[in-house]
Amino acid sequence: MKPLRPQIAQLQPSLIREVANAGIGRSDVLAFWFGESDEISPIKVRQAAIDSLQAGETFYAHNLGLPPLREAVARYTQDQHGQTCGVTAQRIAVTSGGVSALMLAMQAILGVGDECLVVTPIWPNLLAQPQILGARVRTHSLRPFNGLWQLDLKALLADITPETRLLVLNAPNNPTGWHLTHDEQLAILSRCRETGTWILADEVYERLYYGGTRCAPSFLDLTRPDDAVMVAHSFSKSFLMTGWRLGWLVVPESMLDAMGKLIEFKTSCAPVFVQRAAMAALARQDEITPPLVRHLQNCRDTLVPLLQAIEGVEAASAAAGMYVFFRLPGHEDGLLTAKRLVSEAGLGLAPGEAFGPEAAGWLRWCFASRDLSRLHEGAKRLQSWLRGA
């Protein structure tokens, strides 16, 4: 048998899944390892999908998505970023999940040997995807300061060179909660225009922002329609639709036909009933997202003080996302610690090593919980385990 491609054979499995697999099915484990709320999708979203199926919408759709959905996404984007952002339906590609949007964007830009610069720590898929394509991956690390991770903008700008084909940013960031300011985005955009570097901005957490505005700063607030910038979004986080697997890309209009071809050869199209559910979510987004954000902020403001009250724990409140990224005194191996917490404390967290070597020893806690008592109980279990460890 001929061997697999080296890029595939050398892929590292998900360390989050490695920890979760050790505890899935155990009723005594409080699970906070995956990045999703434990709230089910709203009833009107579910009903829209049911109605679509009952109406017999079980056939193929347009590669780029249903035209009414693309129009709705464009209007939603203009609501968040103003009509001056220049986002129309002719810049929207609907994809089968946010992760598919990211992979499609990379496939459009990266070839074997192309340089891809990734700002880390970051969701592991965004490191694996360019590796699968045979690109040369370089990383630029954020640095922790008093529990919060920050960007050395000057150093990042120096790392972006004419050899850099693609810059990958996830801001607001999973797992750290770090986000970019408009001044930082403008500096990065200016540098990438100079070097001819594409930007792939993963902004799926933009609405989960606690900074006093409807959403976090976005590249869409600053870019021209013809800029070499692709912005990835998802219905998963802000609309409570993780299992539906639907996302979208905002791309330059000149790129849209190419995205349609890539989607055809990857998934053909997203299911119609899922797209109908997404249309219902967008139509009712003011009923879904703002209450969710308020609840998540309450979750964050509940969990962070509980962790800070545990002696030696380094934790801080990030301004965005659904995670607390923290570390424990005397526990430098996050993967081992996460496994021990599952088996010895019944507490399921994600290891920092899953997000890059610079995050070794850190742990990610997804605080998106309907019941705040679960957060209290989880912190209690952590404290008890630390005392006995």
Image (cartoon, helix red, strand yellow):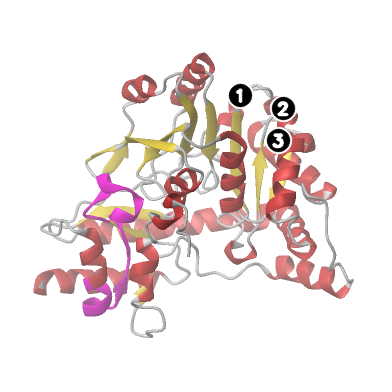
User: Which of marks 1 and 3 precedes in the sequence?
Assistant: 3
Residue beneath the point at 68% across and 22% down: 226
Res 214 seen here:
no
Q: Residues within 10 Å of mark 3 (few under 14, many from 20)?
A: some
For mark 2, give the secondary structure.
Answer: loop
Which residue lies under the disc numbered 3?
Answer: 78
Using the image, determine if residue 342 lies above or below residue 137: below
Which residue lies under the disc numbered 1?
Answer: 223
Labelled pair 2, 3 in contact (Cβ < 8 Å): no
Q: Distance between the residues labelled 2 and 3?
A: 8 Å
Corner quadrant of residue 348: bottom left
> x%, y% of residue 23?
35, 78
Q: How crowded is mark 2: few (under 14 residues within 10 Å), some or many (20 or more)?
A: some
Front: mark 2 or 3: 2
Which residue lies under the disc numbered 2?
Answer: 86
Residue beneath the point at 59% across and 71% down: 40
Specify whether residue 384 is painted magenta.
no
Q: What residue type is labelled 3?
A: Gln
Range drawn in magenta? 340-362
